[in-house]
Amino acid sequence: MLLFLGAFLITQNFHNQYYYLAAFTVLQYIILSQGWNILGGYTGYVNFGTGAFFGVGAYTSAMIVKTFKIGKSAPFLELPILFIAGGLVAALLGLGLGYLTMRIKGIYFSISTLALAFVTVTIILNIDALGGATGLYIIRPRKIPFFTNYMEFLFLVMVALSIFAVAFARYIENSWIGRGLSAVRDDEDAAECTGVPVLKLKVFATMASSTLMGVAGAAYPYFVTFLEPISTVSLDVGVNSLAMPLIGGTSTWAGPLVGAVLLGIIQQIALVTLSPEYSLLVIGILLVSFVILAPEGIVGLFRKFRASLKK
Amino acid sequence: MSQPLLEVQQVFKNFGGFAALSGVNIYVNPGERLGLIGPNGSGKTTMINCISGLLTPEKGKIIFEGNDITQMTPHHRARAGIMRTFQIPKPFNSMTVVENLCIPLEYAAEHKTSLSVAEEEARKILTLIGIEALGDLKPTGLTQVDMRKMELARSLAGRPKLLILDEVMAGLSGSEVDEILEILFKLNEQGITIIMIEHVMRAVLGFSKRISVLNTGLNIAEGTPDEILNNPEVEKVYLGE
Amino acid sequence: MKLLKRFRIQNIVGFLMGSIFISGLFAPSVYAAEPLKIGLGMALTGGLAAAGKPAKLSIEIWRDDVNKNGGIMGRPVEIIVYDDQTKPSNVPAIYGKLLDVDKVDFVVSGYGTNLIVPAMPIVMDRNMVFMTLFGLAANEKFEYENYFQIMPSGPNPLTDWSEGFFKLASEQNPKPKTIAILAADSEFALNTAKGARMNSKKYGFEIVYDGKYPPGTPDFTPIVRAIKAKNPDIFYVGSYPPGSVGIVKAAKEIDLSPKMIGGGMVGLQYTSIQMNLGKTLNGIVNYWFWAPEPTMKFTGIEAFLSKYQSEAVKYKYDPLGYYLPPFAYAYVQLLGKAIEGAQSFEQQKVADYIRNNAIDTVVGKVSFGKNGEWAKSRALQVQLQNIQGNSIDEFNRAGKMIVLHPEEVKSGNLIYPFPGWQ
């Protein structure tokens, strides 16, 4: 609550556009990381196809904007509708993924998700209504009441969504669903035999995960103005959504948050300090180091540090 | 009540070309202690997997409390009251022992109150088994015996009507075997039907009221422990002790 | 304990978020004469880096040229470039930083529609003049009056590309009847194909084949055979470098020899591909932007090219630089001249000057029309002729890339029909 109010006050008083634009991507990744972690961290299914769900959310949102032009009559309503729609369509895709891959585990699952990303790009490329290869223009509204410009409003909405994503992940983690997901992650057979409906939980996790990813994607068209399949359903999004929770820590909601904020900020800084090749190198090194040396991520390191202090 | 609690009727299970079970029949009455023995590869673990639902037989039926559960998912069977241990213990390694027990408590026994109440229940079960001191530890540091006891405790947490033990005595010392047996007798007295699959003869002969013998996926004998001990067929195929 | 954990996590988050804001407060340096800062994002890594890096080099050459002559209205030019990594999602933040943190005086675009469009909202919000580098009809949906495009496609971006090609075909006697159209399944190629269809109708050619291929197709023999079976008089192709080379080679191999071949193939203008194809290029008619013909010697182009070529060798960029580099020089050159012409640093005044004046650049006299496109198309149609071999000296002189269209820069005549593969 406080965070949201704080963010609102910022938009009223602080108008340096750059920070809103930079923050947008960081916030987008907070949502994507939390989403990824529900299936990846809590349930143990590593998804490389985040781009597919993100892209589905983005294109759904863009198509609704183009077809219905809600923005004119009900500007504040438009975004929620877009998010719900983007989230729903992504959830459907997630449902499909859940059922198609229900018998596939481990690395085979991960490879299937990679395939999903490619298939999605191909499908979008071949649907002319979605702009195909020539792309889709989504023009950001120039004005919106209460805000100096639309980007600040978008920022605020993203803050709200990030808060929701974190709260949602935290709720799941601490609930009986979360405990069931941990059982699935630890040992599916033992989970089944102790009464955990493994398939249902996996499908739930897939859908929850993909819904968040779709919601994150739904805001993207207004940010980037031009949607083109290859850069929207990109491996980039997939790798970041995976690296951020891994580096932050996958066992709890705080991990993806820390990972997204940290890595997101590093990437934004690297983008504008004239040495972008290094940002990719840095992320790569961080990822490998953490996976080998600190598999529980930053959160894990933090816990160990605190535990050693107690001794 | 003349109806058996569990019936395995003419069950066939193949893996590719290999016939693991070729028409096996087992039954156990409510409150009974049934022992299931046979040489390695005779199909005992396959049998348990069919009963618990991790495998579906090609032919035959599994009947529990008069209901045909052959097509039922494993987690439904767990909720219906069938719990099993695993030959190689399968703990949930990311959770403490207490948390391990909360899973069947919340899912199989459907104990949907709050977590803290479930944890209390879990600790009570641990006390029953005698491992309450391990409650807040993670399974990765436990000894073999303690892991077996945890598996046992976790099965109990599911409030089973039928408990199936898959070689729970393997590798345990004499006194450890006695510890477990004592717990098992207690549980049976409380009304839990138990099927014990075992290689450790002392345990299964001493524990079971009735024993069924499998070899290469077929029943070859059935009877009281004494009858089985003196059965020449059993002696012939089962060169273990 | 859980409360403590939450509190600490919130602290970390707060600290990290705070550091975004703090990190932006770089201390500004102090200059003698206030520099004129021009900012842009450019593809220095990623898919378009092979074009983006030479573009950056060309911009820097311009900056040095201008500063040698005292800068612009006395102010030294400073260029700030950030790598957009060929990712549209990076563009908004880059232009945000340039405008709000680096406080640049002017911005120009990156290379390509994908990287131009994401910057439009920010640029439009501040009413900035926006010189852009090679985007196809990128302003059509915005209709922003201060947008200007240096690519010489002309006011009808779809058809102007190929207009010359079709006009040439229609002037031949006997007039060709049938045409096959093939395009890569990508933005630019599909657009030229669209234009080709429109032009086919306009000039009365019957389309006997109209297909597209997925980018990355390794073997064009089947497609080219299918086209040969239709025996078209004209073969119009919209393709990107790997496809352009593949299609030409496949056509040679199975001897698909229509009366006219070429059109919208990207890549034939690159030195490395020219050296690869050598004589095989002879007879192909294709869109072109600049060729070393006597009719194309605009003011300053030769001086620029010699500076570019001496630097390009060091970095292993396209050694001749006839395709994008002159235009990368021209789009900033034009901006600089407009500032001086308007005698003002105000966005609107500079934009108005550009819109209302024809300005001399290294790519000729440029004047803009509707939507910021060139008032008159200067998309050349060039026929490759007289190429004897594969050495670079075949391609760095006049007489090899004959300009056929438009009329005012024509440097030779079309050899028709296509003389066959060599």
Image (cartoon, rainbow, N blue to C red):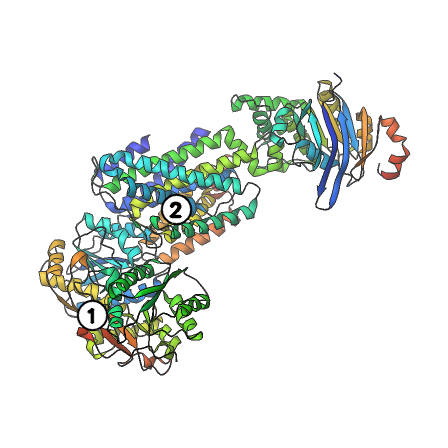
Left or right: residue C175 compared with residue C67: right
Res B118 quadrant in image: top right
**Quadrant where the N terminus of chain B is found in the figure:** top right
Asked if B169 appears above or below B18 in the picture, the reply is above
**What amino acid does circle 2 point to?**
Gly
The secondary element bearing badge 2 is classed as helix
For residue B174, say whether it is visible: no
Q: Who is closer to the viewer here, C132 or A42?
A: C132
For residue B2, say whether it is visible: yes
Q: Who is closer to the viewer here, B73 or C307?
A: B73
Q: Who is closer to the viewer here, A308 or C362?
A: C362
Evaluate whether label 1 is on the same chain as label 2: no
Res B198 quadrant in image: top right
| Residue shown at the point (31%, 65%) measured from the top left | C206
Determine which residue is flagged by label 2. A55
Give the number of callouts.
Answer: 2
**Quadrant where the C terminus of chain B is found in the figure:** top right
Q: Which mark is residue C363?
A: 1
> In the rendered structure, the residue with mark 2 lies on which chain?
A
Distance between the alpha carbons at the discs numbered 1 and 2: 40 Å
Please state the horizontal and vertical placement of residue A282, each as a whole percent of the image.
42, 54
Q: Residue furthest top?
A: B1
The secondary element bearing badge 1 is classed as loop
Left or right: residue C118 compared with residue B209: left
Asked if C25 appears above or below B111 in the picture, the reply is below
Please state the horizontal and vertical placement of residue A219, each as a whole percent of the image.
33, 42
Please state the horizontal and vertical placement of residue B178, each as a whole percent of the image.
77, 27
